């Protein structure tokens, strides 16, 4: 559920508001302000207490229904708390922006505090009740002992390989074998090759193929296979290496004695080791582990990992990035596990259904093997179609299919989880604009910063980490950077998001849960005999609404004006917005992207969006002027205007102190203005 990121944002908001309310210790600051500050401090204390338990709670969620229900209740309340705190922050900004000449900020804050105090009290009281459940549920706090979810424990591996698993990896085996057999690196005693790839893609299988190759076995004097567990304990790992290469138990426990023993055992010999499933990113631990191997004449170490950062720390030879299998190889594997030796007698209908199921597995070997094995003893088309027509995450096989990916997800840092789950709102094969995705994370409060840090820089670091951990695939296209999620990784995000993120296609009648937070609308048809009813009442909790450019029209009951909790709103080009549409109630809005074909001027009420950070106006051929009170957008950091008829920029634009980026379609019209406003970073 990624609640850790939400709670980090709540704590950050709470600290900001305490600072805003603390306008001095003088007696005239008001009783309400004193009470508000005390309530906020108590709320922050509770939030810290609950956040400390989240690591253990999220680990236990999958196998413990009571924990799952507790987290769902906590999630709903956390969003409510964020809304209340954010609305209070909005009121503080409004008090400052609309300050009258005879009213001090202190008086304004007192007035605001009076109206919000009861809401803060109610939220704090509810959090207090939920926090009490920690005793019955026996949660560990984050700085206490950590337990890794027993349902997600890594299955120990050995060097023995299942022959059928060779299917589809012959080319990779030969390439990796050539890399390891190269003599050009012999001057370097210890050579390390890393196989990097997502969970279930076949890293261990490929390592097994190399380890069992007879040429490798003849080439080296000592061979060892070690499957690492959650932590990189040098003492335990050294002992396991000794036992693996000597085939005898080692009774030593002292690290110095262990290292001396292994140093003598391999002195002057050629050694080949496989370290399977490495997670350690601590360079000093790695250096300590490899120290005794310098006595050998040559050491080749093959490492499998899901994290590219691990490879950068330990490798000496180029990284071997393992890709998904081709469709042809995937079908060969599916046939083997689903049909076995009776494939020639198989119904052609089953083959056709099987190919569609295989594609749903996204060319991920472990998923193909799991689902095909499930179907091996079924020869009824109904059973196969049941798997095909239901999403894989709803089938009984989800645990086996997602186990390796779920382990990777469970190990994600808390701050990355909400960023990853947010992507489940978009359709499969979606091409994520890196810039826009990072911005959306920021506007949802998922990127944690302080006043000295740049949110975009940290957001890009989050994205980089997700790439390194094989959740994202990044690439440059048309001079821009984009991300893509593999189908199975996208399914994993949907499985863990719990339907809070929803992708709505125009041909599919919506079936929303009670808590809908992020919605992407695509391909809504312009003419339909019986359009599905749109449950606009579900919009009350909505925080993101994005419409693709394929949306041509909306049904009459599509009323997003009820979505007053929105942080991000992006409308499709063909969606008509009435000129008198009111934005007054969108107090939480950070990101607003409009296609303004109908606008000659923006409604003045946009200037009441005190939390707005990004305003993008695209395809506005008739836009002639901006609102005069645009200076009220005190939080605005980025303004993008693509309007050919716009001739004048209001002088109040210069009062936007937070503005960092200004995009203009034709900057030559505004040269004089821009010269007078030299502190804006201009992008054309």
Image: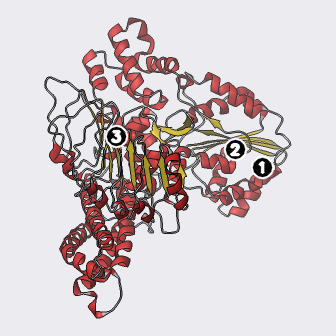
Residue 245's tag is: 2
The residue most toward the top is: 345
Name which of mark 2 and mark 1 comes first in the sequence: 2
Please name which of the two marks, 3 or 2, marks the residue nearer to the observer.
Answer: 3
Q: Position of residue 465 (x, y in %)?
A: 54, 49
Q: Are marks 1 and 3 in contact (CB under 8 Å)?
A: no
CB contact under 8 Å: marks 2 and 1? yes
User: Residue at coordinates 71% horizontally, 29% vertically from top-left?
Assistant: 177
Comparing 87 with 491, the one in front is 87
Tell me the number on the disc at residue 622: 3
Check disc 1 and report the residue beneath it.
Answer: 265
Q: Is residue 393 left or right of residue 180?
A: left
Q: CA distance from mark 1 to mark 3?
A: 81 Å
Q: Earlier in the sequence, mark 1 or mark 3?
A: 1
Please provide percent x and percent y for residue 509.
19, 32
> Residue 656 appears at what percent x and percent y?
43, 63
Q: Secondary structure at mark 1?
A: helix
Q: Residues within 10 Å of mark 3 (few under 14, many from 20)?
A: some
Query: Mark 3: which secondary structure?
Result: loop
Snapshot colouring: secondary structure
Q: How many marks?
A: 3
For marks 3 and 2 on the same chain, the one whose residue lies earlier in the sequence: 2
Residue 56 visible here: no
- Residue 56 vertical position relative to residue 332 in the rendered view, above or below: below
Tell me if 392 is positioned left or right of 667 in this view: left
Residue at 33% in and 56% down: 627
Q: Residue furthest bottom?
A: 27
Residue count near mark 1 (Cα–Cα under 10 Å), binned few <14, some 14–19, many ≥20: some
Residue beneath the point at 77% across and 32% down: 181
């Amino acid at each position: 559920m990624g609640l850790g990121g939400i709670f980090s944002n709540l704590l950050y908001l709470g600290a900001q508001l305490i600072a805003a309310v603390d306008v001095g210790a003088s007696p005239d600051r008001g009783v309400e302000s004193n009470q508000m500050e005390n309530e906020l401090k108590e709320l922050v204390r509770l939030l810290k207490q609950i956040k400390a338990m989240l690591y253990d709670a999220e680990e236990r969620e999958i196998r413990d229904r009571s924990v799952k229900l507790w987290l769902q209740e906590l999630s709903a309340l956390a969003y409510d708390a964020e809304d209340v705190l954010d609305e209070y922050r909005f009121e503080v900004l409004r008090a400052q922006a609309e300050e009258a000449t005879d009213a001090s900020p202190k008086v304004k804050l007192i007035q605001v505090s009076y109206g919000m105090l009861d809401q803060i009290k109610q939220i704090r009281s509810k959090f207090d009740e939920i926090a009490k459940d920690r005793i019955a549920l026996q949660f560990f706090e984050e700085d206490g002992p950590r337990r890794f979810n027993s349902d997600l424990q890594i299955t120990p591996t050995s060097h023995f390989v299942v022959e059928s698993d060779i299917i589809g990896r012959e080319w990779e085996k030969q390439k990796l074998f050539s890399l390891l057999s190269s003599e050009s690196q012999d001057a370097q005693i210890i050579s390390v090759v890393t196989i990097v790839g997502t969970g279930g893609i076949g890293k261990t299988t490929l390592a097994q193929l190399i380890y069992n190759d007879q040429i490798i076995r003849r080439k080296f004097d000592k061979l060892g296979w070690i499957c690492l567990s959650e932590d990189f304990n040098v003492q335990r790992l050294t002992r396991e290496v000794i036992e693996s290469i000597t085939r005898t138990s080692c009774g030593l426990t002292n690290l110095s004695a262990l290292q001396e023993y292994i140093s003598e055992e391999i002195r002057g010999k050629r050694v080949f080791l496989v370290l399977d499933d490495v997670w350690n990113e601590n360079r000093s631990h790695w250096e300590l582990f490899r120290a005794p191997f310098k006595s050998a004449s040559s050491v080749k170490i093959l490492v499998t990992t899901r994290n590219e950062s691990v490879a950068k720390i330990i490798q000496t030879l180029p990284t071997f990035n393992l890709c998904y299998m081709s469709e042809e190889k995937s079908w060969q594997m599916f046939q083997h596990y689903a049909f076995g030796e009776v494939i020639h007698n198989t119904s052609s209908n089953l083959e056709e259904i099987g190919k569609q199921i295989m594609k749903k597995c996204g060319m991920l070997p472990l998923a193909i093997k799991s689902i095909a094995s499930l179907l091996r003893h079924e020869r009824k088309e109904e059973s196969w179609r049941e798997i095909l027509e239901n999403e894989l995450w709803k089938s009984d096989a989800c645990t086996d299919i997602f186990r390796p990916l779920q382990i990777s997800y469970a190990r994600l840092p808390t701050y990355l989880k909400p960023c990853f789950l947010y992507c489940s709102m978009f359709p499969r094969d979606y091409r994520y604009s890196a810039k826009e995705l990072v911005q959306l994370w920021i506007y949802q409060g998922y990127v944690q910063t302080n006043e000295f840090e740049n949110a975009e820089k940290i957001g890009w670091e989050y994205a980089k980490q997700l790439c390194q951990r094989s959740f994202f695939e990044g690439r440059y296209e048309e001079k821009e950077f984009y991300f893509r999620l593999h189908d199975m990784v996208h399914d994993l995000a949907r499985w863990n998001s719990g339907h809070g993120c929803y992708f709505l296609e125009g041909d599919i009648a919506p079936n929303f849960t009670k808590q809908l937070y992020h919605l992407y609308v695509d391909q809504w048809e312009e003419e339909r005999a019986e359009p599905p009813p749109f449950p606009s009442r579900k919009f009350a909790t909505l925080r993101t609404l994005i419409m693709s450019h394929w949306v041509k029209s909306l049904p009459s009951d599509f009323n997003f004006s009820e979505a007053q909790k929105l942080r991000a709103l992006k409308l499709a080009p063909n969606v008509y917005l009435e000129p008198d549409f009111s934005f007054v109630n969108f107090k939480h809005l950070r990101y607003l992207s409009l296609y303004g074909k109908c606008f000659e001027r923006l409604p003045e009420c946009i200037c009441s969006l005190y939390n707005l950070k990004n305003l993008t106006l695209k395809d506005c051929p008739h836009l002639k002027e901006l609102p005069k009170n645009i200076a009220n957008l005190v939080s605005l950091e980025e303004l993008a205007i693509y309007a050919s008829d716009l001739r004048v920029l209001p002088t109040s634009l210069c009062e936007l102190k937070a503005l960092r980026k200004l995009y203009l379609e034709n900057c030559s019209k505004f040269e004089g203005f821009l010269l007078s406003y030299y502190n804006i970073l201009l992008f054309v």
